[in-house]
Amino acid sequence: MRADWRECQREERSGQWSAIYVTLNAKGYIVLGKTAYQRLGEPKAFLLLYDGTNNRIGLKPTAAGIRNAFPAAKSGRHGGRLIRALRLLNEFGIDVKETLQFPDAEIDHDGVLILDMRSARVSSRAIVRRRAEASMK
């Protein structure tokens, strides 16, 4: 019998755990996945930047002792980090009603993680949580 092999095509996108994962919630918590944190050089803290013209947030890695540095606390068990950034939301009037995810988060040539608020979407986990709460009522 003759074999009829066909090659399986591989998707061009990266896997879930190798992509940059970043969320921002209404409490001002910015959560970086392990991969994002590692690609930024695993800094102890970040300077928080805001570009109002383009509605973008920037996270610039820095040392913990630097003025205006926001510490990167451990988040979860898998190497993620949490930056408490409520001051950023308040100071620049950024309104976040639900947890947002940044699917196109990128690190620019200066090493700044760019979070574009225009392309942010409601996190799938937030949607699941909202549906679960609605079904309990």
Image (tube, helix red, strand yellow):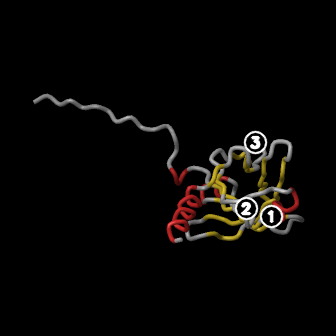
Q: Position of residue 71 (x, y in %)?
A: 77, 68
Determine the secondary structure under disc 3: loop
Q: Residue at x 61, y 54 (%)?
A: 21
Mark 2 or 1 closer to N-term? 2
CB contact under 8 Å: marks 2 and 3: no
Instruction: Give the labeled residue for mark 1.
Output: 63
- In the picture, the disc for residue 108 is none
Asked if the residue under mark 3 is in contact with the one under mark 1, i.e. CB atoms within 8 Å, the reply is no
Which residue is pictured at 66% across the width and 50% down the height? 102
Q: What is the number of the mark on residue 43?
A: 2
Task: Determine the image quadrant of residue 3.
Answer: top left
Identify the image quadrant of the N terminus.
Answer: top left
Residue 57 horizontal/vertical position (percent) = 78, 51
Q: Amino acid at mark 3?
A: His
Q: Earlier in the sequence, mark 2 or mark 3?
A: 2
Q: Quadrant of residue 49?
A: bottom right
State the image quarter where residue 5 is shown: top left
Is the residue marked by circle 1 packed among few (<14), some (14-19), or many (20+) residues within 10 Å? Answer: some
User: On the rendered structure, is 41 left or right of 65?
Assistant: left
Q: Position of residue 87 (x, y in %)?
A: 84, 65
Kindly identify the residue that appears in the image at 45 percent across and 38 percent down: 11
Q: Nearer the viewer, residue 38 or 75?
A: 75
- At label 2, which amino acid type do we have? Pro
Residue 64, image x, y percentages: 80, 67
Distance in Å between CA atoms under marks 2 and 1:
7 Å
CA gap between label 1 and label 3 equals 19 Å
